[in-house]
Amino acid sequence: ALLYDPLHFKVNSSKSVKFSIPGNERFRSRDQLVVSGELLGEKIHIIVIHWPSRRGGESKSRPKRIAAAKLSKSIVDSLQQINKKAKVIIMGDFNDDPISPSIADFLKASGSTFLKNNQMHNTMYDHYKNGIGTLAYRDQWNLFDQFIITPSFIDNEKNYDDFTFYKSVVYNKSFLKNQKGNYKGYPFRTYGGSNFLGGYSDHFPVYMFLVRKAL
């Protein structure tokens, strides 16, 4: 789902794109939501995703996320065929890190801001390289929650004539963390199995800033 403020964002169209794997009729996964609209009058496209989990192991489940990446990339490519400078944001839980094949090789997303049209910028790349994650599992941090954007959001000259990526943030304040026990420092979950713990989520929230010159 996409939550938005209608005072600032006007939806022009939305579509739920089915995610399937050819030859695997039993495969079921979440659709990818494509929303096109105007952010304070400027047209942008948002793809909301939640790629397949790592259940069964990262390696075994990897082909499912690669298939999801191919679908996401095909949506971006379609939007760029209509307008090569289309502003597209892919956001959600990728269940992969910024360096995983699905993102680095198939979405062609990296931390670079010098991009060709078929490449994308991963706004969370530097956080990952600095050891910052959004969730922890068996004492290992991952950064699955990401914003990936098309080159049209990048302004290396910093003119800010239109909406431009400024920075991203992992919101990992102390009140969102376990304060004691074996999972101290981990995100404070709502549930542990079937036990209600009263926390917020097993992931930290993320957000990013888009800025432009004031009118």
Image (cartoon, grey):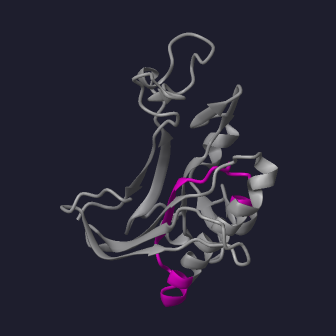
> How many numbered discs sit on the rendered protein?
0
Q: Quadrant of the N terminus?
A: bottom left
Question: Is residue 31 visible to the viewer in this orientation of the structure?
Answer: yes
Tell me if residue 199 comes above or below residue 73 in the rendering. above
Is 206 in front, or is 67? Answer: 67
The residue shown at (50%, 72%) is 152
Pick out the residue farthest to the top: 180
Q: Which residues are magenta?
A: 78-104
The residue shown at (80%, 53%) is 60
Pick out the residue farthest to the right: 59
In percent of width and height, residue 28 lies at 60, 64
User: Horizontal placement of 215 versus 145: left or right?
Assistant: left
Pick out the residue farthest to the bottom: 82
User: Horizontal placement of 213 versus 121: left or right?
Assistant: left
Is 37 in front, or is 50? Answer: 50
In percent of width and height, residue 25 lies at 67, 73
Q: Is residue 91 magenta?
A: yes
In percent of width and height, residue 140 lies at 71, 30
Task: Place residue 57 in its image quadrant.
Answer: top right
In percent of width and height, residue 13 lies at 33, 78
